[in-house]
Image (tube, rainbow, N blue to C red):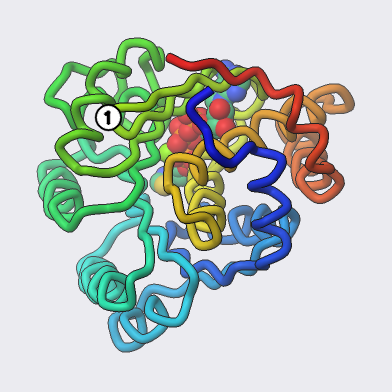
Amino acid sequence: MTLSTSPATALQTMRAGTPLVHCITNYVAMNIAANVLLAAGASPAMLHTPEESADFAAIAGALTINFGTLSPNWVDGMHKAIDGAQAAGKPWVFDPVAHYASPWRSGIARDLLARNPTILRANASEVLALGGGETASKGPDAGDEVVAAEATARALAKDLGGVVAVTGAVDFVTDGTRAVRIAGGSPLMPLVTAMGCSLTCLVGAYAAVLDDPFDATVGALALFAKAGDMAKDGAAGPASFQVAFVDALYNLQPAALETVALSDA
Ligand SMILES: Nc1ncnc2c1ncn2[C@@H]1O[C@H](COP(=O)(O)OP(=O)(O)O)[C@@H](O)[C@H]1O
Ligand SMILES: Cc1ncsc1CCOP(=O)(O)O
Ligand SMILES: [Mg+2]
C-alpha cells in the first residue's frame, strides 16, 4: 500500500487537531457540509465575501473552494482566499461542480485550476471533461464511471503537481505517481444532494492536519466510504440515509477504518 498514514491514524490526527476549515461552498451545500465536518470532528466556517476571505484563509487550517452556485463577487472572494491561503502556506482544495454547464463557468474553472490547487476533488464526469473528454453529464450529477476518468486524473495530477480524487461507486485517488481505489459507501449517496461538496470540505479538514495531501485525501474518502456502509443498513431512503450518515461520521471509531476496501491502482 502506498500510504504512509493509514485512514485510522488520519482520523485520529484529524479529530485531535479539530482543524478550522474555510469552506467557500454553494448555497445547497452549506448546511450539510458544516454538519458533516462537525460530526467528523472538524470545525467548519462557511464564508466567501472578498472583504474578509484573504484574512480568514490565512488563519484557517485549509481552504476549500466549490463553485456550485456562482456569481461574480464570489469569484473575487475565491481569488482573494486562494491568495491568502497560499501566502500563509495553507493547502486548498478545488471542487469544480458542473464546470461544463456554461462557457462562463468553464472559464472560471480553468482560471482556478491555474492557481495550483493542492487537491482536486470531483466526480467522474467533471474530471473527464477537465481533460477535454466527452461527458454524458450536463449538471452536477455524474453521468460517467470513475474508471473512464482514471487516465485523465493521472495526467491532471501530473500537470497540477497535486492530488486528484475522482469519486463514484469506487473512488480513485492519484498524485500522478501513486494511485489507490477505495470501495464502499452506498448507492444512496448520489441521491443526497451535496454529498460530494461535503466530502470536498472534509478533504480540507484532513489536509489541514496531515503533511501528505495524498494520505489526507485517501483518509477523508475512506471515512466517507465506511460511514456510508454503516448508514445504509438502517436507511429507508435518501432522507433517512442523510441523517444516519451524519450520525455514522460522529460514532465511527478509527479501528473501523481498518476494514475499508483500499487497493493500489
Ligand atoms: N454508487 C455509489 N456507491 C457508493 N458510493 C458512492 C456512489 N456514488 C457516489 N458515492 C460516494 O458519494 C460521495 C460523493 O461522490 P460523488 O457522488 O461522486 O460526488 P458528487 O456529489 O460531487 O457528484 C463519495 O464518497 C463517493 O464515494
Ligand atoms: C444541486 C446543486 N446545484 C448547484 S450546486 C448543487 C449541489 C451539488 O452537490 P454535489 O456535487 O455534491 O452533488
Ligand atoms: Mg459535486
Horizontal side of 246 relative to 195 (left or right) equals right
Disc 1 crowd, CA 10 A, few/some/many (<14, 14-19, 20+):
some
Horizontal side of 213 relative to 70 (left or right) equals right
Rendered location of residue 193, percent (x, y)? 56, 40
What residue occupies the far front of the structure in this picture?
4
Rendered location of residue 243, percent (x, y)? 79, 43
SS category of the residue bearing label 1: loop
Residue sitting nearer the eye, 168 or 150 = 150
Horizontal side of 213 relative to 250 (left or right) equals left
Residue sitting nearer the eye, 106 or 179 = 179
Identified at 34% across, 40% down, the residue is 163
Residue carrying label 1: 176
Image quarter of the C terminus: top left
What residue type is disc 1 on? Answer: Gly
Q: In which quarter of the image is residue 82?
A: bottom left
Instruction: Give the quarter the ligand 3 occupies.
Output: top left
Residue 109 lies, with reference to residue 16, above or below; the image says: above
Rendered location of residue 37, percent (x, y)? 65, 57
Q: Quadrant of residue 222?
A: top right
